[in-house]
Image (cartoon, rainbow, N blue to C red):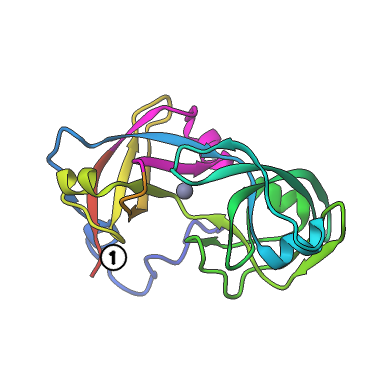
Amino acid sequence: MIDGNCGYWRSEEPRPPIEEALPHIEPLISRYNEVPVRISGRHIHISQSDLEQLYGPGYKLTKYKDLAQPGQFAARETVTVVGPEGVIEDVRILGPVRDRTQVEISGTDGYHLGVDPPVRDSGNLEGTPGIVLVGPFGAVTLREGVILAATHIHMNPEDADKLGLKNGDRVQVLVDGERDIIFNQVLVRVDKNYITEMHVDTDEANAAVIEDGDCVIIIGKVLIQ
Ligand SMILES: [Zn+2]
């Protein structure tokens, strides 16, 4: 704000110790705390019924290439995303099909499209903006489903054990690079089908000067009271 008071420390109250504003961290003491990063471009997870509206009755996704996470693939199919103020063509569908359609974009994309999606964990779509998708057969108007994907780490159970982490934990991650950025509250998702890697979107990668395949360091577990 213009007077320099952002409202965190209200002026009428004595300022509490800075520690109260910092996340409480339990440092990880492990030599296995480095994980590789994948940069996720904008993409769509699609339901079968929406796919059929976009590509025709009975349509099935076809594989373009496998992703690092086992079973996940980039499809040949793409759609045009139409927002109130802009259009993005050739947005890749990732398979397999899901129960609900979800559009994952960057904040920069949202600015271009004219939507202002919140940061959400995958699948948590309530109250998110809608958008229009256009395919070669038809169009779908989504009532909700556009998100900025929250930073997360896919982790297999063996790696989680080594680090003392479990599904749903939040961690701090250091990008020990040109900008030395720390990501706070990174969600850890543990599943036996995962290979261990952190996912960031293109805006996060640009801000933190991350290149696809770089390694980052999990420095601690965030203790949430
Ligand atoms: Zn992911």
Residue in the picture at 23% in, 52% down:
221
Quadrant placement of the C terminus: bottom left
Q: Is 58 placed above or below 104 here?
A: below
Q: Is residue 63 above or below residue 136?
A: above
Viewer-closest of 74 and 16: 74
The location of residue 125, given as percent across then percent down, is 57, 69
Q: Quadrant of residue 33?
A: top left
Quarter of the image with the N terminus is bottom right
User: Which percent across, then down, holds residue 188?
Assistant: 33, 53
Q: Is residue 204 magenta?
A: yes
Q: For the point 68% across and 50% down, which residue is it? A: 61
* Residue 2 can be seen in this image: no
Percent of width and height locating residue 219: 24, 41
Left or right relative to 108: residue 150:
left
Q: Position of residue 190 (x, y in %)?
A: 31, 54
In front: 34, or 191? 191
Q: Nearer the viewer, residue 138 or 127?
A: 138
SS type, badge 1: loop
**Magenta-colored span:** 195-217
Give the residue pinned by disc 1: 15
- Left or right side of 139 for 117: left
